[in-house]
């Protein structure tokens, strides 16, 4: 087991495509680190540089205190689970798991003992003699993990291991991976584009955009103190709402009305003109189900609800609004960056399941003004971020830099941001 | 409608079978007829009294008496030549083709297209056009009428086809297989031998069978580059089966030789047909 240090890692392909740009991340021994971002953000490339399948253009990759830039994958002693599992179809499950041990020249008795241990951990005992072709998706996934845990690797690397499973199995395997990692206490780097996996699995999460690190922090820090519009939009489901806003004193003017925000937050956003307010859906509520003492005129507004999706424990209400052109443009760009497609500007509100608001109603909505973030629409920076509780935020405006790189990438390979990694 | 279709399918199937297999059946039946029977002029389909005489005669030397041209009539030796030359040419060709195809499928290098098109050009080149120059060269190099003298051209002519077949198979194998092996601690050579080659086995067998058939059935080079049974293969040897009377070729013996030559081919196809069936890679990746 070992710590992994990435120092100013750069990856530039032969055609000049800048896939990874100056990323520095330290993964502590035993830590579970997530690399997350939309497709084309360089997260898989970074992982493949750790394992040695991709050359490093510049920067240092240090594993367990040893620089490994020029080492072949087999000399790095890392275990990797591939997105499509990459099981050996001509070998039985037993031999698949035993493969790394056999290469290392282990004795038959040692191989047998270790393979049986691994298969017991992963509950593969009754499948050992079968071929991968006869296994279900979840079982194949477990075999791939068995092949990883069977040897004493310095670290585990996962490349979107759950993306080929159905939703239910994905949830189960997620817990399984988490449990396994905690038990073995092994350093793990896990690549995903799914923010739920990122939030639930990681000790820390690195959010990447266009090969540039946006923020490296714990899931809670990312959620509560996103460094910029991109991180804010990426983390959380349904995503954060972005509204045009103007700050006057401690009053914030939103399209639906004016709310009062705490002084210290307002102070950070004084005199900046048109801003973007970021409010998570769960920080809204139907005023009629909120405790009396919380409801005040400064924190409520009236709006007509367009659509309601009732899920039992909660409901999502959609309220369309008109955005000024510059904000609308920024929102569209953001949607594209997040692999989405913006159809209309609308507010998504998470309501309590007990709420009786239905479609077409004029409703009184309460908003938790303490949780409103204010972003600079030009740079995307979060003006109200609490720097002490935001983990590592690279300086120099990562989001704007990412957009610059994005243009460079498009010059080399037009439409590269839509390519799946 | 469905029943009608099924009947149509079967009728067509039988017609094609008849069309293809009738000559084979004719040769088999001919091989069991005595010399007298074939000389009659209008022989019937089935032999009047079936005899193994032809097989016996073919196996013993000399099988049809002294040859007027003075050519040796050693069928066993020719058979041995055929097996030896075909198998060696096949093994060498498949090994070389596997390595070459792997490089073509996996590596990026300058002139890759050139190599592939050159290989194809060689395959398209008419063999007859090369017989003259080759004869000249081989007599100079002392390769005339030797095993290597046939093995080398057979290898060269089958390599392109083998390379094309195999590189198509290698391309089908996901890159991740090999990368996984490398991460698991394999050297490039181990990854190739333990993962890639087993996965490409159907391709290797296909290439091997095609190469073997080519070498086994080849006639033009075999007759031009040999002079004695030291290296003459069966197809060439059969053309010397003229018998004592030039106007009355020993049809029965020729048919017998044909049957014997066809047998190994049929056996090989039956043995390997399961291996040729692709789909071995199923289950490697998501699916």
Image (cartoon, grey):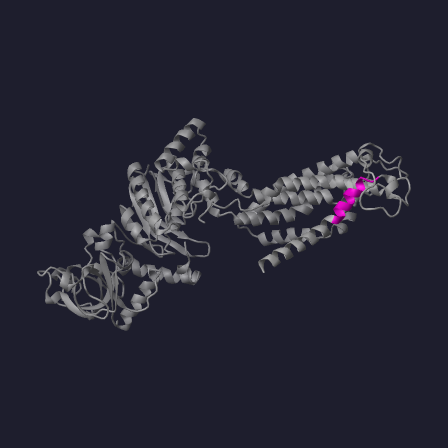
Q: Quadrant of residue B236?
A: top right
The residue nearer to you, when weighing A29 against A412, is A29
The residue nearer to you, when weighing B71 against A399, is B71
Range of magenta residues: B22-33
Magenta stretch contains residue B23: yes
- Quadrant the N terminus of chain B occupies: bottom right
Query: Residue A127 at x, y = what percent?
Result: 42, 37
Q: Quadrant of residue B256?
A: top right
Image position of A205 with respect to A100: above or below: below
Can residue A267 be seen at all in this image of the molecule?
Answer: no
Q: Is residue B196 left or right of residue B129?
A: left
Query: Residue A370 at x, y = what percent?
Result: 15, 59
Q: Return the residue found at the far left.
A: A293
Can residue A394 be seen at all in this image of the molecule?
Answer: yes
Q: Residue at x 53, y 48 (%)?
A: B106
The residue nearer to you, when weighing B151 against A75, is B151
Query: Residue B73 at x, y = what percent?
Result: 83, 36
Magenta stretch, main secondary structure class:
helix
Q: Is residue B154 left or right of residue B255?
A: left
Query: Residue B45 at x, y = what percent?
Result: 80, 46
Magenta stretch contains residue A407: no
Q: Residue at x 53, y 44 (%)?
A: B280
Image position of A307 with respect to A172: above or below: below
Q: Residue at x 81, y 38 (%)?
A: B50
Image position of A367 with respect to B82: above or below: below
């Amino acid at each position: 087991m070992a710590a992994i240090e990435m120092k100013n890692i750069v990856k530039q392909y032969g055609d000049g495509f800048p896939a990874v740009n100056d990323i520095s991340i330290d993964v502590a021994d035993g830590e579970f680190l997530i690399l997350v971002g939309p497709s084309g953000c360089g997260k898989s490339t970074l992982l493949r540089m750790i394992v040695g399948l991709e050359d490093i253009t510049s920067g240092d990759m240090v594993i367990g205190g040893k620089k490994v830039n020029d080492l072949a994958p087999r000399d790095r002693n890392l275990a990797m689970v591939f997105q499509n599992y990459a099981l050996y179809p001509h070998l039985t499950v037993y031999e698949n798991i035993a493969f790394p041990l056999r290469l290392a020249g282990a004795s038959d008795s040692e191989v047998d003992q270790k393979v049986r241990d691994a298969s017991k951990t992963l509950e593969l005992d009754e499948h050992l003699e079968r071929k991968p072709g006869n296994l279900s998706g979840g079982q194949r996934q477990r075999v791939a993990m068995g092949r990883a845990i069977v040897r004493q690797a310095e670290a585990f690397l996962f490349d979107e291991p759950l993306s080929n499973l159905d939703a239910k199995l994905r949830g189960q395997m997620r817990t399984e991976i988490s449990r396994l990692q905690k038990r073995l206490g092994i350093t793990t780097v896990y690549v995903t584009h799914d923010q739920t996996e990122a939030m639930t699995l990681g000790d820390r999460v690195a959010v990447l955009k266009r090969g540039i690190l946006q923020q490296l922090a714990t899931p809670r820090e990312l959620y509560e103190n996103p460094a910029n519009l991109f991180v804010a939009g990426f983390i959380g489901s349904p995503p954060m709402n972005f509204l045009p806003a103007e700050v006057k004193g401690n009053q914030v003017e939103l399209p639906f009305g004016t709310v009062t925000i705490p002084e210290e937050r307002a102070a950070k956003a004084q005199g900046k003109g048109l801003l973007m307010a970021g409010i998570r859906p769960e920080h809204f509520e139907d005023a009629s189900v909120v405790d009396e003492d919380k409801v005040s005129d400064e924190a409520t507004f009236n709006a007509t609800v367009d659509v309601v999706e009732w899920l039992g424990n909660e409901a999502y209400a959609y309220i369309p609004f008109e955005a000024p052109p510059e904000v609308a443009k920024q929102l569209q760009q953001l949607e594209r960056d997040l692999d989405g497609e913006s159809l209309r500007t609308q507010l998504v509100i998470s309501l309590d399941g007990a709420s009786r608001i239905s479609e077409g109603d004029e409703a009184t909505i309460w908003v938790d003004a303490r949780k409103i973030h204010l972003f600079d629409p030009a740079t995307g920076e979060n003006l109200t971020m609490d720097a002490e509780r935001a983990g590592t935020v690279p300086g120099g405006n990562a989001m704007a830099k990412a957009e610059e790189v994005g243009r460079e990438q498009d010059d080399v390979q037009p439409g590269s941001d839509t390519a799946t990694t | 409608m469905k029943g009608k279709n099924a009947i149509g399918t079967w009728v067509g199937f039988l017609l094609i079978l008849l069309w293809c297999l009738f000559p084979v059946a004719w040769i088999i039946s001919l091989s069991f007829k005595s010399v007298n029977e074939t000389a009659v002029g209008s022989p019937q389909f089935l032999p009047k009294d079936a005899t193994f005489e032809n097989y016996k005669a073919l196996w013993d030397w000399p099988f049809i008496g002294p040859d007027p041209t003075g050519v040796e009539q050693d069928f066993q030796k020719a058979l041995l030549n055929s097996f030896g030359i075909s198998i060696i040419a096949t093994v060498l060709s498949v090994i070389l083709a596997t390595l070459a195809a792997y490089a073509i499928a996996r590596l990026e290098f300058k002139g890759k297209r050139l190599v592939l098109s050159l290989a194809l050009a060689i395959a398209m080149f008419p063999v007859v056009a090369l017989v003259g120059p080759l004869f000249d060269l081989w007599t100079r190099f002392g390769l005339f009428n030797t095993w290597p003298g046939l093995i080398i051209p057979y290898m060269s002519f089958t390599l392109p086809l083998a390379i094309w077949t195999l590189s198509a198979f290698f391309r089908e194998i996901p890159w991740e297989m090999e990368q996984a092996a490398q991460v698991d601690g394999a050297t490039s050579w181990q990854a190739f031998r333990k993962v890639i080659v087993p996965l490409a086995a159907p391709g290797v067998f296909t290439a091997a069978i095609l190469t073997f058939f080519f070498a086994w059935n080849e006639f033009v080079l075999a007759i031009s580059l040999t002079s004695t049974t030291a290296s003459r293969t069966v197809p060439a040897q059969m053309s010397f089966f003229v018998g004592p009377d030039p106007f009355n070729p020993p049809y029965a013996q020729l048919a017998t030789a044909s049957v014997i030559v066809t047998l190994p081919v049929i056996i090989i196809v039956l043995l390997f047909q399961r291996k040729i069936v692709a789909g071995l890679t199923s289950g490697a990746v998501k699916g």
